[in-house]
Image (cartoon, rainbow, N blue to C red):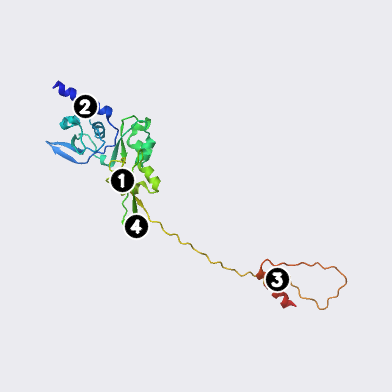
Amino acid sequence: MKQIVVFLVAILAFSSVVAQESVVQRSNDKVKIEGKTYYIHIVKSGETLYAISKAYDISQSEIATNNPDIYAGLKVGQALKIPKKSNEVESDENYFYHIVKKKETLFGISRQYNVSVDDIIKINPEVKDGLQQSQTIRIPKVKMEEHSEKPASDTLSFIIHQVQPKEGLFAISRKYGVDAKEIEFYNKELLADGVKLGTSLRIPIKPRVDSTTVVTPNVVVPTKTTDAIAEVVTPCKSDFVYNGQPFNIALLLPFTQEEAGAYESAIEETV
């Protein structure tokens, strides 16, 4: 019996030290066994006993007690029974559970999940004074609003993007100029556990609309020059007598060819 306890403690200590900080999404599948409620958690690639225990807010030893097969190590696809806490509030399906990595910041996490820092603090008030490595925080899921007038699939084309190291949803949306909510909408299953390295995402690309060049015809507005010229033309006086007095003569120069034609016509009419 003492050897079993020592072995269990060794496993738990080892998993805590070498555990890779990963995002674990809580399962909503529950079963009742002998009157007690359990979550059924399917182990995914990269998940550790430590991360799973943090996501369900339960100790590693309690998980091990209910799942003795994990003594041989966790396996992808393995089903774990996670006992449900009696005082647990069942509203966790709306959140991701993020294990804080070394040197991570609230701003960086908010960009990764495309949520605001204020939203994270509102749900996790303890992070207001700073993050702690290996701390588990809840991240609200960003839901794509499904409007009745959502884009039809035949009006969109898609390109496939493979997630690169340290690349988040916000960075991908900026790269392609597509709203992060749209990317999440078309990749719901792939992003259920967060953005994973190497995942191939469908990025919706809207077809370009050919811009039509509108040619505005040149409209020539007739210039009214005849009246202006008529104002400066004075008929000759038949009884005029020249007594050697000086005359002030002004020469009117037209600005356009049309004004010149109108001026000549006005002179001819007065002669």
Q: Nearer the viewer, mark 3 or mark 1?
A: 1
Q: Quadrant of the C terminus?
A: bottom right
SS for dot 1:
strand
Work out whether residue 143 can be spotted.
Answer: no
Between the residue at mark 2 and the residue at mark 3, the CA separation in whole angstroms equals 107 Å
In the rendered image, residue 84, in percent from the top left (x then y), is placed at 19, 35
Mark 2 or mark 3: name the one nearer the start of the chain. Answer: 2
When the figure is inspected, residue 123 is found, relative to residue 17, above or below; the finding is below
In the rendered image, residue 241, in percent from the top left (x then y), is placed at 86, 75
In the rendered structure, which amino acid carries the disc numbered 1? Answer: Ser
Q: Which residue is mark 1?
A: 200
Between the residue at mark 4 and the residue at mark 1, the CA separation in whole angstroms equals 21 Å
Between the residue at mark 2 and the residue at mark 1, the CA separation in whole angstroms equals 34 Å
In the rendered structure, which amino acid carries the disc numbered 2? Answer: Ile
In the rendered structure, which amino acid carries the disc numbered 3? Answer: Ile
Q: Residue at x 32, y 46 (%)?
A: 201
Extreme residue in the left direction: 34
Q: Which residue is mark 4?
A: 155
